Amino acid sequence: MQLDGKVVLITGAGSGIGAASARYMAEQGASVTLAGIPVDGVEEVAAEIAGRGGKTLAIPVDVTREDEVKSAVARTVEVFGKLDVIVANAGIQRHNTDIDLFEMEEEEWERTQDVNLRGVFRTVKHGIAQMIKQGTGGAVVIVSSITAIQGRSANVSYMTAKTGLLGLNRHIAVHYGDKGIRSNAVCPGSLERTPDWDEHPDPEGRREAMMAATPLGRLGTPEDIAPWIAFLASDDAGFATGGHYVVDGGITIA
Ligand SMILES: NC(=O)c1ccc[n+]([C@@H]2O[C@H](COP(=O)([O-])OP(=O)(O)OC[C@H]3O[C@@H](n4cnc5c(N)ncnc54)[C@H](O)[C@@H]3O)[C@@H](O)[C@H]2O)c1
């Protein structure tokens, strides 16, 4: 199997892309730490995977808390013996409030940055430190977004954070390649549900607009994204680093 023997830590693993990746990567032979909030989410998905014979560990982790991220890496190593792969996936999207640059308070801007950009910084910081300590190399997969390569999104702090992640991705690739550490980013397009979906002001309008703009004529699902994350994490992608991979039904180039 593609990820036989690998130990993977995924943030935001209690739903959506993180949960789909945890399921897929466990099926490919990986031991998976599901880190994230809410705790019910990560525990349920971990139990479901374990029920099918997968090796999992659920850890409540808020990526805005560096101590929690650091402990999750330590606990993963305690339980599974090492860390090979980090999937930095946790994210929020404040549809109703991350929208107007000139009226936005700094606090609103910072809420998204703290999870979507600094949360990834905290995750890769402690994950890469462990990989260097082990001396065995490793793979980082950062979940960015097509909003990192377009200007269309109304969510200004969100798209700025997602763009920043591509810089972080390239930095890791260049500066830790000599340690055998690869880093790649995935840029998903419009999925059927976004983070904080229940707060979306016009779900039906969005669905229609996105479907009309997408050459493949449908919105994506977490299951469309998970195999890309697994592939980039695997040794099959051993010569790929510093890249970002658009998986979007063609909406970006249309
Ligand atoms: N759904 C889309 O259309 C889409 C498109 C492009 C990129 N993305 C990105 O994919 C990633 C996953 O999103 P998703 O679509 O699966 O939505 P999702 O809401 O199902 O997943 C995000 C997960 O992160 C968790 N989370 C939020 N704040 C956290 C924190 N402080 N600490 C730990 N976990 C936290 C959430 O509880 C949730 O489980 C996000 O980074 C998102 O920006 C999604």
Image: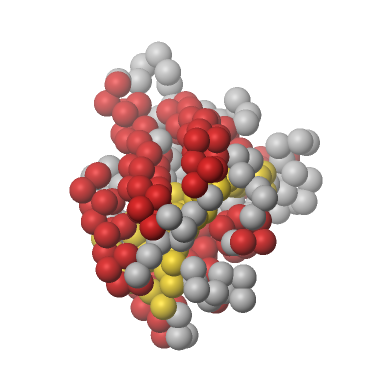
Q: Is residue 132 left or right of residue 78?
A: right
Is residue 101 shown above or below 129?
above
Please name whichever residue, 61 or 106, is drawn nearer the observer in this view of the structure.
61
Q: Where's residue 121, x and y in %?
A: 38, 39
**From where the camera sits, is residue 162 visible?**
no
Is residue 107 shown above or below 173?
above
Please name whichever residue, 99 or 16, is drawn nearer the observer in this view of the structure.
16
Please name whichever residue, 120 or 182, is drawn nearer the observer in this view of the structure.
182
> Residue 86 sits in which quadrant?
bottom left
Q: Where's residue 132, x and y in %?
A: 40, 50
Is residue 1 shown above or below 111?
below
Is residue 216 shown above or below 19?
above
Q: Where's residue 174, x and y in %?
A: 55, 35
**From where the camera sits, is residue 6 visible?**
yes
> Number of marks in the image?
0
> Residue 209 sits in which quadrant?
top right
Image point 31% across, 29% down: which residue?
A: 110
Image point 32% across, 65% down: which residue?
A: 77
Q: Is residue 237 left or right of residue 123?
A: right
Position of the N terminus, as image quadrant, is bottom right
Q: Is residue 47 left or right of residue 175?
A: left
Position of the C terminus, as image quadrant, is top right
Q: Where's residue 179, x and y in %?
A: 49, 47
Image point 62% across, 31% down: which residue?
A: 149
